[in-house]
Image: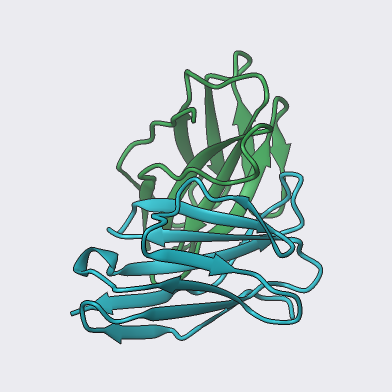
């Protein structure tokens, strides 16, 4: 498809529950990125993939966050034992790499209560 | 990661040109300058990017200072749909394509 599809749009979890977010990148794009937007303007890079391989995971809180991009499946970002501070909008983006433009999805709003 | 500095907010009237400034005094020779914008309740959207020369596309123009320590995004005729937060971002050839967002400039456009 010609857009990055993220599901679900909204997710509510109680503290300590697991949250799983999905992202279908644009076909033909080999790079996938996950970003977290906590406050209105503050983005944090989490992780990137080149095809199914982790490319850069320097932003991932490794204790509770994990991510995968498997062939023929949407990419996923999973948060084990969610905390209140995980409440944010999580954006997925994909690109062809080589400093070409990144296309972002509409985001998943995670609310931890 | 090299940082960028932008004004928190700017205002414009419809159909007027808008010049959005960005300072990046610690830019290195391999850093590209990217601009993205985020409309309300949407994901960021690519606007333009460049390395050394000025760039034009259908959305905007990017003017890069000769010393590359600053740049300006130019919207030639602002419309109400251009109201958004505009982010100036540097990415390095050593930086695995990730985008390090700053706090951006919120552009308001008045009819």
Residue A73 quadrant:
bottom right
At a point 55% along the width and 71% down the height, the residue shown is: A105
Q: Quadrant of the C terminus of chain A?
A: bottom left
Query: Position of A87 compared to B97: left or right?
Result: left
Q: Colour of chain B?
A: green
- Left or right: B9 with respect to A47? left
Q: Is residue B42 above or below residue A57?
A: below
Q: Position of residue B91 (x, y in %)?
A: 59, 37
Task: Please name the residue shown 59% across and 41% down the image.
Answer: B34
Q: Is residue B83 visible?
A: no
Q: How is the image coloured?
A: by chain
Chain A appears what colour?
cyan
From the top left corner, tell me how far across and down residue A46 is, in percent: 47, 55
On screen, residue B11 versus residue B60, left or right, reads: left
Vertical comparison of A71 with B31: above or below: below
- Residue situated furthest right in the rendering: A28
Q: Is residue A47 visible?
A: yes
Would you place residue A5 above or below residue A51 in this image?
A: below
């Amino acid at each position: 498809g010609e857009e990055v599809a993220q599901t679900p749009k909204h997710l509510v979890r109680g503290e300590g529950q697991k949250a799983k977010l999905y992202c279908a990148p644009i076909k033909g794009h080999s790079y996938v990125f996950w970003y977290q937007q906590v406050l209105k303007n503050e983005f944090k890079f989490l992780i990137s993939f080149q095809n199914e391989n982790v490319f850069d995971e320097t932003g991932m809180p490794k204790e509770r966050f994990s991510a995968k991009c498997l062939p023929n499946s949407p990419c996923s970002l999973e948060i084990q034992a969610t905390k209140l501070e995980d409440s944010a909008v999580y954006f997925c983006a994909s690109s062809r790499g080589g400093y070409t433009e990144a296309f972002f999805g509409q985001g998943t709003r995670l609310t931890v209560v | 990661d090299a940082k960028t500095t932008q004004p928190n907010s700017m205002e414009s009237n419809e159909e007027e040109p808008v010049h959005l400034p960005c300072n990046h005094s610690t830019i290195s020779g391999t850093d590209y300058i990217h601009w993205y914008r985020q409309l309300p309740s949407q994901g960021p959207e690519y606007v333009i990017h460049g390395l050394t020369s000025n760039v034009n596309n259908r959305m905007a123009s990017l003017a890069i200072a000769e010393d590359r320590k600053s740049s300006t995004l130019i919207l030639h005729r602002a419309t109400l749909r251009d109201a958004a937060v505009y982010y100036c971002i540097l990415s390095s050839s050593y930086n695995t394509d990730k985008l390090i967002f700053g706090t951006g400039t919120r552009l308001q456009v008045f009819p």
